[in-house]
Amino acid sequence: MPTKIEKDTLSGQETTGHEWDGLKELNTPLPKWWLWTFYATIVFGLVWMVIYPSLPFWRGTSGWIAREAIVEEVRAAEARHAPMMARLREATPAAIQADDEMRGFALAGGRIAFANNCAACHGAGGQGAVGGFPSLADDEWIWGGSLEEIQHTIRHGIRANESDEQRMSMMPRFGADGLLTSAQINDVAEHVLSLTGRATDTAAAGRGATIFAEQCASCHGERGEGNREFGAPRLNDQIWLYGEGRRAIASYIHNPRMGVMPSWQGRLDPAVVNMLTVYVQSLGRVN
Ligand code: HEC
Ligand code: HEC
């Protein structure tokens, strides 16, 4: 195809010389303002590359490093918060809760500390998970929902053997250790269901009641109301740590799994433990 630059007869503008089936392309240069803006961005980019760290071997003339800038910001924030953290460290959770300023700080900081340290097991909103991770956002407490009790649980942990004052208790392995036969375990599981009116075999539930009184009531209470001293959960409600239904309950009685939670007193600043205490209680209801 011959290319010839010529003037378009209609518009009087130059063509690019390209022609397709008699159609010619007008040569319309970019507007000047656009071009200059484009050049300006290139210049800006080059200047930026000189001033700031932009290439693997070039640290920039300004000496500014993103990582160091953040470290400095964090340090400044820590310094700003230091007086408040000192107060939170010395105060009791009850005193923190009673003071608007400390309480607001504790709830905000507690939420972050919870997301970082606790959410993996207890869920992002403290809703818990089947498999032994209790909800902290309800009014049922295994070990207690007062500020002192929550603080003790967080500080010393549960069955983790990391603190002399840990929460500790073990439910016997009734089936696995041969303390009860399978038939007896089914009966007592039926009785546990009857505590919330869900038993389907009343004869079995009746036999199970005797076993429950002898073997279980000392920890779980006569009516399955639970006992915080032993961390024995309530059985006469609809909240189940390890799944509901006869099969789940019977298999649990056969071979109970005991929940373990680390002790946090050596891992977290005491101020953070106090913040978490106030935050965790705010999730649920005191009962
Ligand atoms: C490795 C998993 C794990 C992590 C991480 C964890 N917990 Fe727990 N937590 C548990 C388990 C399991 C239990 C229940 C133990 C039991 O059955 O008695 C529990 C119980 C509790 C209880 C007692 C609840 C009650 O009903 O009495 C509190 C309070 C608690 N956790 C707070 C926290 C806080 C705050 C953090 C973060 C600093 C945290 N947990 C991190 C596993 C965990
Ligand atoms: C020495 C105290 C003790 C005795 C005795 C005991 N339990 Fe438990 N039981 C516990 C503890 C502690 C837990 C909770 C373990 C955990 O939180 O991980 C538990 C948990 C359970 C659960 C699971 C609850 C849930 O929410 O999923 C069931 C069901 C149960 N026990 C039934 C029984 C029955 C039935 C007996 C009698 C045959 C019995 N227990 C005897 C301490 C005891």
Image (cartoon, helix red, strand yellow):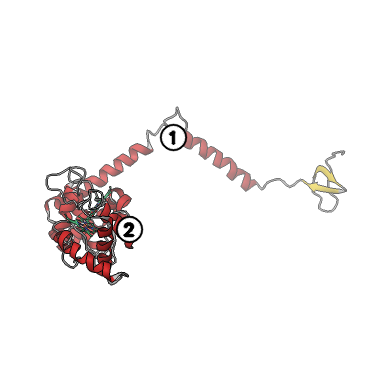
Label 2 beta carbon within 8 A of ligand 2: yes
Residue 74: percent from left, percent from top: 29, 44
User: Which numbered mark, 2 or 1, is in the foreground of this view?
Assistant: 2
Element type where label 2 sits in the image: helix
Q: Is residue 287 above or below residue 171?
A: below
Residue 221: percent from left, percent from top: 16, 64
Residue 121: percent from left, percent from top: 30, 51
Element type where label 1 sits in the image: helix
Q: Nearer the viewer, residue 69 or 235?
A: 235
Circles 2 and 1: CB atoms closer than 8 Å: no
User: Where is residue 242, by image quadrant?
Assistant: bottom left
Residue 37: percent from left, percent from top: 58, 45
In the image, ligand 2 is in what quadrant? bottom left
Q: Is residue 130 above or below residue 192?
A: above
Under mark 1, the amino acid is Ile
> Residue at point 81% right, 53% down?
11
- Which quarter of the rendering shows the C terminus? bottom left
Q: Which residue is mark 2?
A: 248
Q: Nearer the viewer, residue 136 or 209?
A: 209
> Can residue 218 be seen in the rendering of this structure?
yes
> Can residue 96 be seen in the rendering of this structure?
no
> What distance separates the C-alpha of mark 2 from that of mark 1?
65 Å
Under mark 2, the amino acid is Ala
Q: Residues within 10 Å of mark 2 (few under 14, many from 20)?
A: some
* Count of residue discs: 2
Q: Which residue is mark 1?
A: 51
Q: Which residue appears farthest toward the top when viewing the image?
A: 57
> Residue at point 25% right, 65% down?
192
| Residue 131 falls left or right of residue 51 | left
